[in-house]
Amino acid sequence: MFSTLTSLMHFAETGPTVHIVPNELFTIHGIPITNSMLYAWISGTLIVLFLVIVARMMTVRPRRGVIQIVEALTEFIVGMLENSFRSRKKALQYAPYFVTIFFFVLLNNWLGLIPGIGEAVTYNSEPLLRPFTADLNGTLAVAVVTMVVVQHFAIKESGWKRHIRHYFAGSLVNPATWLFGLLEVFTEFTRVASLALRLFLNVVIGEIIIAVFAYLGHLAAPITSLPFVALELFVGALQAYIFVTLSAAYLAVATQHGHEYEAEDEALEATAASIKSVKSAK
């Protein structure tokens, strides 16, 4: 509680300073290390340790506490995947990745609200720690990795030929097929930007709101900003869910298109075989 008061009262005394871009702390072999990169390593280590400990404590018999919460959230994501893929088997197949990305984004959002993250602790007059998801580079990296994995799963599910074919639906002789196909390919890049910007802006706006109300509250900063900190806990969970839902939806659309073209190809092969048999009979 004392660290919370110190962190929030810092804003009240100095004003609502907001950094949209990360600050460079030092360099390693000429590579600049920013405060968001440093906190990404710290939070990533903590997240891995937390999930490994929880996984080892899980038993067949349900347990209460944090383990029960993790199990409930995992089952919730699996249920969402089942609705997206319309198959329990597919949901369980892809659950390890989507559950991992959900907890990674969720816990990174929540770890960014810990007192001391931001202006309260400085190094060379720069904030020492900055939330990873409050850095556009961070959210962009998560979005790029997510879309690469989605494309990998889609290709593995449908094959290269059918996966590429679903972008160019229609007759390949028609120029419009190529035009709309290129637009579909471009859409994949806009999805990366959409995932990254949505997560980044929600986290940064939450930071700004908390800083402003801490400044307006002055000595009562913990009281005036506390409701918005609680709100950000909800927003952080919501954004993690939205991120995973959209990613799963992109994969579901890609794989379903692959199965549609697979059915079409099988129908065409059957038709060609029947025509060939009729000609041979004549």
Image (spheres, helix red, strand yellow):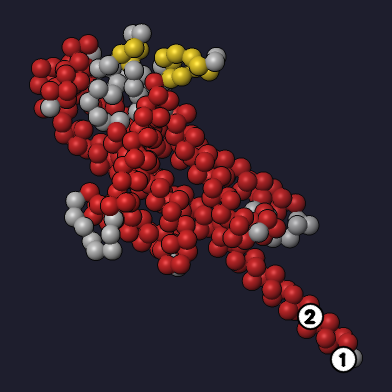
Q: Quadrant of residue 271?
A: bottom right
State the image coordinates of residue 115 (x, y, percent, origin top left): 22, 26
Return the mark for residue 273.
2
Which residue is drawn at the image coordinates 19% and 51% (left, top)? 65
- For the question of whether residue 151 can be seen, the reply is yes
Q: Nearer the viewer, residue 88 or 230?
A: 88
For disc 1, the neighbor class at 10 Å (few under 14, some 14 to 19, many from 20) is few
Q: Is residue 263 above or below residue 160?
A: below
State the image coordinates of residue 61 (x, y, percent, origin top left): 24, 63
| Residue type of the residue flagged with mark 2 | Ala
Kindly report the distance in space between the C-alpha atoms of the residues bearing marks 2 and 1.
Answer: 12 Å
Give the quadrant of the N terminus. Answer: top left
Q: Is residue 80 above or below residue 146?
A: below
Which residue is disc 1 drawn over?
281
User: What SS does tag 2 mark?
Assistant: helix
Return the mark for residue 178.
none
State the image coordinates of residue 165 (x, y, percent, origin top left): 68, 57
For disc 2, the neighbor class at 10 Å (few under 14, some 14 to 19, many from 20) is few
Which residue is drawn at the image coordinates 58% and 55% (left, top)? 154
Q: Is residue 41 above or below residue 69?
A: above
Which residue is drawn at the image coordinates 32% and 59% (left, top)? 75
